[in-house]
Image: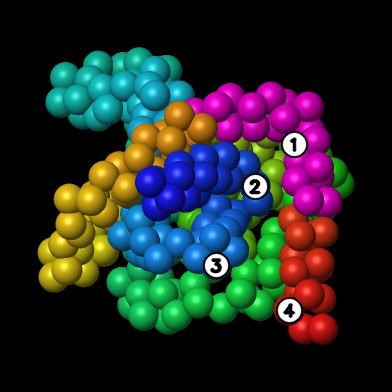
Amino acid sequence: MEAFIKAIILGLIQGLTEFLPVSSSGHLVLFSNFMQFEQSGIAFDVFVHIGTLFSVLIAFRKELTQMIIAPFVIWLQKKEDKELKEFLSWDLYVVVATIPAVIIGLFFKDAIEHAFTSILLVYSMLMVTGLLMFLTRFLKERNTPLGYTNSFIIGIAQAFAILPGISRSGSTIFTGLAFGIDRVKAAKFSFIMSIPAILGAAVLQLKDLAAAPPTFHESMIYLVGGIMSALTGYLAIVWLIKIVRRGKLEWFGYYCFTVGLIGLLWSLF
């Protein structure tokens, strides 16, 4: 029962922090260590990330449906549709933005897993996330269109966010805002481009899971965590969109910097 309670807590943390710019991976590492939750390894991390994947699919079901339809209508049926053309462009931008994360995931997998064992690294990277979020208050919208170049660079920001403590949503939204992209559009693109990244992370772990499959009891623990992360993830998306509209992302900067600084000082002294 204790393990289930810990899974619920960590699933809740994952769901809230996956989309809020405070680093879900960093918080999972910290709380897993604090609670001494032995099941919170890579397998559990994948399960709760899949839970948040469902959050994105539900929150942006209309946009995703149009993105799926667009290639068939424009390429196969040869129909001209201005709205669908934009969704087709988003399909291509997501592919371009995913390339950096694929490269990092394939060639630096072992180094990434090792990074999840360093508490000091988590605290340090949380301070970096805090700084990025604080700087968003100085970034102005310039109605810059989303394109291949800035999509790729946003993808690089996502790749760096594989490090625990660097927020994926925070770093990608920050990069989009730095280009002058509309705030809400930058946030939506950040969420939608997370879909292949989350799926890729799960696929990379399939080999490890197949070699040491979880027991039925462990699977139930993972499932509970995944369901909780899906529910809270959806709420986090809705909340963050409202905060982005108000231009108040620096709130999360104060939080991340404070947690990172206190944790770093506590660990060192």
- At label 3, the amino acid type is Asn
Magenta residues (range)? 234-255
| 41 vs 6: above or below | below
How many numbered marks, from 0 up?
4
Residue annotated with mark 1: 142
Q: Position of residue 58 (x, y in %)?
A: 39, 24
Q: Nearer the viewer, residue 264 or 8?
A: 8
| 99 vs 169: above or below | below
| 132 vs 181: above or below | below
For the residues labelled 2 and 4, the Cα–Cα distance comes to 23 Å
Give the number of the mark in front: 2 or 4: 4
Q: Position of residue 212 (x, y in %)?
A: 17, 68
For the residues labelled 2 and 3, the Cα–Cα distance comes to 21 Å
- Mark 1 or mark 2, earlier in chain: 2
Q: Secondary structure at mark 3?
A: helix
Q: Secondary structure at mark 1?
A: loop
Residue annotated with mark 3: 33
For the residues labelled 1 and 2, the Cα–Cα distance comes to 22 Å
Q: Mark 2–mark 4 contact, CB under 8 Å?
A: no
| 126 vs 148: above or below | below
Badge 1: few (under 14), some or many (20 or more) residues near its Cα, within 10 Å?
few
Residue annotated with mark 4: 267
Regarding residue 207, the answer to whether it shows in the image is no
- Mark 2 or mark 4, earlier in chain: 2
- Mark 3 or mark 1, earlier in chain: 3
- Mark 1 or mark 4, earlier in chain: 1
